[in-house]
Every structure is written in structure tokens, then in C-alpha cells.
Image (cartoon, rainbow, N blue to C red):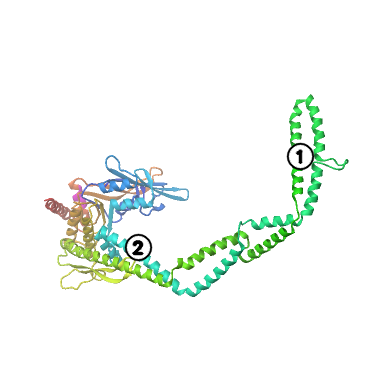
Amino acid sequence: MLIALRIDNFALVDHLELECGNGLNVLTGETGAGKSIILDAIDVVLGGKASQRMIRSGARKAIVEACFQTNPELETWLESQEMESFQDGTVICSRDLTISKDNFRSRCRVNGVVVNKQIITQLRDRLLEVTAQNETGQLLSVSTQRDLLDAYGGKELIQQRELVTQAFTITQQAEEALEYRRQSEQQRLQRLDLIQHQIQELNTIHLQSPTELEQLEIESDRLTHVVELQQLSYQAYQLLYQSESEENQAVTDILGKAELIITDMANYDKELTSVLEIVQEALNQVVEAGQQIYSYGAGLEADPDRLEEVEERVRLLKRICRKYGPKLEDVINYYESLKQELTELTDNGKSIEELEQEYQENQGKLIKLCAKLSQLRHIAAQKLEAQLTQELKPLGMAKVQFQCRVTPVNPNIMGSDQVEYYFSPNPGEDLQPLAMTASGGEMSRFLLALKSCFTQSKMENKTLIFDEIDAGVSGKVAQAIAEKLHTLSKQHQVLCVTHQPLVAAMADHHFRVEKHLTKSEKNQELRTVVKITHLEHQKHRRDELAELTGGHSAEDAIAFADSLLETAALVKEKNRR
């Protein structure tokens, strides 16, 4: 149940607070007074589409906050989402709309915790249900009529439809696999032959590391120039470690002499110790380098057979790279992809016959599931026909006929049924599709009766919002709608926007919405603001009802308003018995 709504800087609202109560809450006011803004705010705070145009002109931030009373089912859901209500059994939903430079940002919170779109949408479905007169157009769609019947059928029917959806998807995939095999068998075999040939070719090469070619080229260069490397390593060894020429001393000899000189110097000046250490380290490194280059040269050996083997392998890998590369890494990746494609093309060995059998089995399962779904829909249709007819009778449609026809069609993702509502509002008229028979006023009553069927079939205590559901009706029909709304409000909190004085008179809580001109505090410019007033006193309600009548003299309007309030009081007393 909606307890309170607070709006700041939203559309034409600078600040507004609305405290709702149990029963029937009615919003009235002239056309364009701002009633829709309040409904827009409720929509936005529960995840509805938001834009920066909703922020009041001149403001940088808009806030909408709604406080709801929880119920046991909602408490269970909150716990499943690792959230909890406040100690007083309430949950607070808020939405911040902010403009920062050229950016627009929106955040939804539940009890102060930021939540995503999915969570707030699921919470919305558990808190309220909105019915507007423009929904009557949606009712004309047979797909909408089917969805409404399925929802009316309850949890078992919805679960069965989900099973049908899953089975249809699996069957469709099996059919596509079969058709693909049938239509592309020749291409598949040709491709399979090519892949097998390429895999066989690459198998004979025994591909190893992606760097094998680089390593082989390095080895080839070494084997090709082994003599030059031996000579050069010996020369380097002489220069570094042991020179045969007395004129050209080795680096180690020179560094050794330098070490002796600096050692003597360090005996007199300890600051040269660091220089001595550098020279000693250099001498050690040169000695190590000389020994290593000597070992390298000594280990070099000409190997013509190995050289020929390496060069042959290099030529082979380069040829493969030209064909499947350009790099050896690309060849290896291509080889792996070929093996994967080979697995896919062979379908783990499944033949056309096996795929056909698989499709037939899935098709059989789908047909059985659709048959059960059809059975459940027929049961729900009969129940809806009886209940909806009863709900329409007190709405001035005592002789109405209604059928929910479930006719067979080819299986699809929603089952094997077409659902269509047939309607005859007057005696002697044949039943025809709803879209062809119902007038605007009849559609409003039909929608209200349908909503009554749904709210009675579900135990959740939701807030029901009706936006001008009574538009286009008057007289006895308007009175019947008013009484139906009040009957609904005994089980659910109802929030209704109306222009009908007959409906407004039945309110348990009556609010007037109106626009005012006020001066801005900053520059004293005139600004339009929306205000809401709770009409608690009988006189204020009478005056508002008199305004709604329109076209009457002031005296007649007041008298009519008094009669409406008296009649409403009698109806309420009758309903309470």
C-alpha cells in the first residue's frame, strides 16, 4: 500500500507531499491541473522511463520518494534479494534525477541502497498495478488477450507455457540442424574432404612451438659459419684473456696492472677503495667473458648432416607458412581451427537419419506439452467467461455475453492456441470479436471488470491505480463504475484519477490537484507550480464536486453535490454490511 509520496523539483512541482490512506483515494482537478504529473512521479520512482525534461526548469536535481507498507509476500521477496523492510514494516523507494554539465544521471534506491533496473521492476510488480483508459486499445490485440488469459490461469498455466517455450526452442534447433544437413550435405562433404586433406598434410609436419622457425634459422646461421665463429672466438679470447703478442696486451693484463697501481694508491687514500673495487669487478668479468668465449669456440664443430637437416626443415616450414600463414603461429592456430571444424562437421557422427529421429522426438514432446497447455487454457477460459460476465452485470451490462475462444493453431513458442475474446453487449446481437463490437464506454467497463477478475484471483495486497478509467461514460454507468471501484478498494488500496463527480463522491480520501502562479524567490518572476490539497471537510468536498458537475448554476451544483455525497454514504454503508 502506498503510504506517502514526496516530490521535489519534478516537472511543474517544486515541492509536494501526498499521504494516501486505505480504501479509495481519488484525485480530481481541472484538465491540465497536473494530475498526470503525480502518476508520472509514481511511475518514475518505480523504474519508469526518465529524462532530463522531468527536472523542473531552473533546477539541477529532482527527487521522488514513495513509502509503501509491506506484506508477508513482499517481505519474503525482499529477503530473497538480501534486503529488508524498516522496523515499522515499510519500504521506501526513491529516484534521483540529476543534470551535471551536459550529462543526465538517474539512480533508483530501495531503503537507501542503489538497485538496478531489474530489481526495481520486480519490486514494482509486487507493489502496484496501473490501469489507464488507453489500455483498451491493447485489449484488441489477440496476443494481449492470450497473455491476459494465461496470467488469469495462474502459476500452473504460466509454468506450462514456459515448458512449451523451452520445448519449442529445442525442437526448432533440431529442425534447423536437420535442414542444414539436408541442404548442405554436398557442400559439407566437399568441405570435409578439404579439411581432412589439410589436416593430414599438417599432421605430417609435426608442428611444435610457434618459435621453431626462428630457432632453426639461428641454428642454421651458426652451422653455416662455424669456421668463422671459431676464428673470431679465438681472436676475442686473445684480446680479452691471453695475447700471444707482446705489443698488444690482453685486457686482463692491462686491468691487472691497473689494479696493482690503484691498490698502492689506496694504501695512502682510502677514498680510492671504491675505484679499486670497480676495477677488480671489471677484471673478474673480463676473465669470466674470456673463459666463456674460449669454451664456446672449443665447443663449435662442423656438422654438415645437421645443417642439411635444419635447412630442409626451414624450407618446409616456410612453404607451409606461405600456404597457411603468414607466420608459423598462424599456421598452428589454423591447424587447431581445422580440427574444431572437423568435429562440428561430423556432428559427433550423427547422420541425417539420426537428426531426423531427434527432431521427431522433440516434436512429439512439444505436441504433448501444447496439448496440456491447451487444456489449462480451456479451463481458465471457462472460469474467466463466468467471472467476467458476473463482474459486468453491475456495470450496466446485465445482458452481456462474453466468450473466450481458444482455437487450435500450429505449435509456436506460445503453444498451439489462438485466444480471442468475443463480446455481445446487447441482447439479440451475435457474438463478435471484441475489437468489432465494444464502444469506448463499453471498453472502459470491460477493462475495469477484467481488472476486478485479476485482483480477486490474486491474494497480493497491491495498490491499484486507475487513470481516467471512467472517461467517456456518464449516468448509471458512471455510478456503477464508482461502486465497482469502491468494492475493489475493500481488498486493495485504490488510487483513481477522475473527472466524474459520481466517482469522486465515493472516495474515502479526496485530493484536489490544481496549478498556482507564484513568484520565484530569486528574481520574483511568476512560476507555475502544482499543489495538492486533501479535502478532509465535507464542505470542501461538496465544493469540489460542484465544480466537477459543470454547466449547473451554483445553487443547483451545490445541491447536486450534496445528493452525491448522501448517495455515496448510503452505498458505502450498504457495502460494509
Closest to the observer, 549 or 356 = 356
Q: Which residue is mark 2?
A: 166
Residue contact between numbered discs 2 and 1, judged by CB atoms under 8 Å: no
Q: Give me the residue at 69% from left, 59% from top.
A: 310
Query: Given the image, on which type of amino acid does mark 1 rest?
Result: Val
Q: Secondary structure at mark 2?
A: helix
Q: Give me the residue at 34% from left, 63% from top.
A: 165
| Quadrant in the picture for residue 129 | bottom left
Above or below 475: residue 101? above
Query: Given the image, on which type of amino acid does mark 2 rest?
Result: Gln
Magenta region includes residue 193: no
Q: Give me the residue at 36% from left, 43% from top.
A: 112
Total marks placed? 2
Indicate left or right for 354 with 90 as reference.
right
Q: Secondary structure at mark 1?
A: helix
Real-space CA distance between mark 2 and mark 1, rounded to the nearest whole angstrom: 78 Å
Q: Position of residue 484 (x, y in %)?
A: 18, 57
The label shown at residue 13 is none
Q: Position of residue 35 (x, y in %)?
A: 29, 53
Q: Which residue is mark 1?
A: 287
| Among the two numbered marks 2 and 1 on one chain, the one whose residue lies closer to the N terminus | 2
- Residue range (magenta): 540-544
| Quadrant in the picture for residue 225 | bottom right
Closest to the observer, 279 or 125 = 279
Indicate left or right for 9 with 225 as reference.
left
Closest to the observer, 557 or 156 = 156
Label 1, residues with CA under 10 Å away: few <14, some 14-19, many ≥20: some
